[in-house]
Amino acid sequence: MGNIIAIANQKGGVGKTTTCVNLAAALAMNRRRVLLVDMDPQGNATVGSGVSKDGVGLTGYEVLIGEANIREAMVGADGGGFQVVPANSDLTAAEIALMDMEGREQRLRRQLARVRGDFDYILIDCPPSLNILTVNALVAAHGVLIPIQCEYYALEGLTALLNTISRVQQQANRELQIKGLLRTMFDPRNNLANQVGAQLMQHFPRQVFSTLIPRNVRLAEAPSHGQTALQYDRYSRGSLAYMALASELIRRDMQAAATTTA
């Protein structure tokens, strides 16, 4: 059954969408069946996967309000090796439409239950805010992967997200866990980055991924070409880092599964 991971951080510009797209591509290169669900009305994960956000027929909007089955909305990432539920500005209207719907926090969870068995990993790209779209993602997920840029306000923003996750755990999804904290846009020459990184390791020793995502121009350039970084430049530092992250995630999950079985 698919491992559902919400990639979330209410702070923008931390590499959330970059992580979602390139982790999906890296997992696919590891022969995992992957579905990327774009829950951000900006549709950046859709575009970064090589899918035209304005040329698709169905998006997460129709899926959430029940006008379409999630399977009907899936499209293939252009050469990426994974499936995508696309998003565009229509998804903004879902926030309004969901207000009067029964079980509005459970809409995505119910849709993903239909296809969970078809995938090894389902990654959900969340918007940079703690709204009903993010709550739907957290209620649907088994784990949360949190990209964090190692800067001054990183820990402050993390506290707000952890509080939201705790409320979701208590009220709607007891299975939800912190999958891991991922240090992104990391520059080892920056003293502040090293200090914040050390603080994260001190406070969350078992949850911080060993993999560091570096600042890398190829990661920034790839979306403008409608490609993942692994397609654009497979051997760039950024691409190699996401391959390492995929391997670390798979290894963690295999160890967890072995422990549960034992």
Image: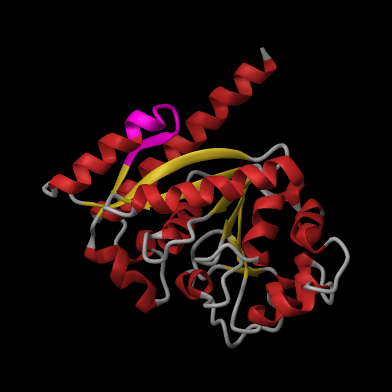
The reply to whether residue 219 is visible in this rendering is: yes
Quadrant of the drawing holding the C terminus:
top right
Quadrant of the drawing holding the N terminus:
top right
Provide residue 167's location: percent of width, then percent of height: 66, 46
Residue 16: image quadrant is bottom left
Is 91 located above or below residue 255 in the figure? below
The answer to which of 216 and 185 lies nearer the viewer is 185
Provide residue 237's location: percent of width, then percent of height: 24, 52
User: Residue 84 magenta-drawn?
Assistant: no
Q: Residue at x 70, y 75 (%)?
A: 95
Q: Is residue 51 left or right of residue 216?
A: right
Q: Residue at x 62, y 66 (%)?
A: 131
Q: Residue at x 66, y 42 (%)?
A: 142
Provide residue 73's location: percent of width, then percent of height: 72, 72
The reply to whether residue 28 is visible in this rendering is: no
Figure label count: 0
Q: Is residue 235 left or right of residue 61?
A: left
Q: Which residue is the extreme one toward the right?
A: 102
Provide residue 81's location: percent of width, then percent of height: 53, 59
The range drawn in magenta is 201-211
Q: Is residue 207 left or right of residue 92?
A: left
